[in-house]
Image (spheres, helix red, strand yellow):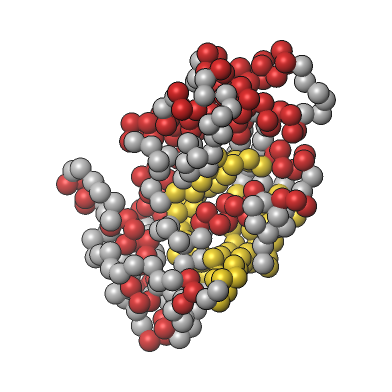
């Protein structure tokens, strides 16, 4: 569905060039939920924005359905292609026009992407179907965003993506602005819609618990690079990069049984450096308790340590889960 090769994105600032994404490679299969995780500033949302066309790539490529180049920004994309790749934003309140009703908000994709001019009755029927899919009553058509809750706003955002009849949806931290009980409702609905409509998702988040329940495969980003990716079960059972072990060790748990499943030897140390001043060699080495001399001199290659499990680390074979 989506293939990313040697992707790089630089932004010019008054302090110099900021490399937000650097030599990133991964592929997302049809019907798959692919997770992209990492701390704030790691570059994961930038990749999502590039896939939907908000930014063009500095170098590298993004291909859709195997042969369509989508690495340039969206002004170079035909409407038919824009229709097939949709985005659900992190903040539902900020992504909905407060002066428009839900009917008016959901009618915009239909006006943009429909092959013919739809009548009011046809538009309302398609909007009603989208609301039904996300579990909202038809009475919401005439409501304004300020009259509904945060979770309901996010369901409207999901309906807005669905009404365009896409193949692929970028979910940019779609639950991070919501409380825990609403998060569960939204994620369950997203999984249900993905299965019913045979959709593919890029699920961007920093919440590893959600990734474990939603994603078939995942990649972990650090300072613009992917440091590890694998099938979800393999990743949680056998993390091989010190940074991913650090992330897993920091997950809050409620029981001793859950605590025993976490890596114990890696403690969260320091903060992610500025992308304007990346460390030489392995970008994680200033925070890594396993670092060797080579780590500060050479960028580690991406290695396949098990089938489908890739790690970018000089020390991966000397680590254990504790």
Residue reaching furthest left?
256
- In this rendered view, identify the residue nearer to me: 78 or 94: 94
* Camera sees residue 236: yes
Q: Is residue 225 above or below residue 133?
A: below
- In this rendered view, identify the residue nearer to me: 302 or 144: 144
Residue 84 in the image, given as x and y percentages of width and height: 70, 39
As drawn, is 209 to the left or to the right of 130?
left
Residue 79 in the image, given as x and y percentages of width and height: 77, 40
Q: Is residue 97 above or below residue 287?
A: above
Residue reaching furthest front?
99
Q: Quadrant of residue 271?
A: bottom left
Q: Quadrant of residue 292?
A: bottom left
Q: Is residue 52 above or below residue 5?
A: above
Query: Which residue lies at the image location 30% right of the left edge and 69% below the top edge?
Result: 270
Residue 57 in the image, given as x and y percentages of width and height: 67, 62
Query: Which residue lies at the image location 47% right of the left edge and 36% below the top edge?
Result: 93
């Amino acid at each position: 569905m989506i293939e990313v090769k040697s992707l790089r994105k630089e932004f010019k600032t008054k302090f110099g060039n900021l490399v937000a994404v650097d030599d990133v490679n991964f592929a997302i299969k049809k019907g798959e939920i692919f997770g992209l995780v990492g701390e704030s500033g790691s570059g994961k949302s930038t990749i999502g924005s590039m896939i939907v066309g908000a930014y063009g790539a500095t170098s590298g490529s993004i291909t859709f359905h195997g042969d369509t180049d989508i690495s340039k920004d969206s002004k170079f994309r035909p409407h038919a292609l824009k229709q097939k790749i949709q985005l659900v934003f992190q903040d539902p309140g900020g992504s909905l026009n407060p002066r428009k009703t839900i009917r008016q908000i959901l009618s915009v994709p239909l006006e943009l992407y429909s092959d013919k001019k739809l009548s009011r009755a046809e538009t309302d029927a398609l909007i009603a179907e989208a609301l039904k899919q996300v579990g909202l009553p038809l009475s919401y058509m005439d409501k304004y965003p300020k009259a509904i809750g945060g979770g309901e706003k996010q369901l409207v955002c999901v309906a807005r993506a669905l009404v365009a009849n896409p193949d692929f949806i970028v979910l940019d931290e779609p639950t991070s602005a919501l409380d825990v009980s609403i998060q569960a409702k939204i994620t369950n609905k997203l999984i249900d819609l993905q299965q019913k409509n045979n959709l593919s998702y890029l699920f961007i988040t920093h919440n590893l618990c959600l990734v474990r329940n939603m994603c078939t495969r995942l990649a972990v980003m650090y300072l613009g690079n992917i440091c590890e990716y694998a099938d979800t079960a393999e990743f949680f059972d056998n993390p091989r990069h010190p940074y991913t072990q650090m992330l897993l060790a920091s997950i809050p748990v409620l029981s001793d049984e859950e605590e025993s499943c976490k890596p114990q030897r890696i403690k969260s140390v320091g903060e992610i450096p500025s992308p304007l001043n990346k460390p030489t060699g392995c970008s994680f080495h200033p925070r890594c308790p396993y670092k060797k001399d080579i780590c500060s001199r050479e960028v580690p290659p991406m290695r396949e340590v098990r089938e489908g499990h890739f790690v970018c680390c000089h020390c991966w074979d000397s680590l254990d889960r504790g």
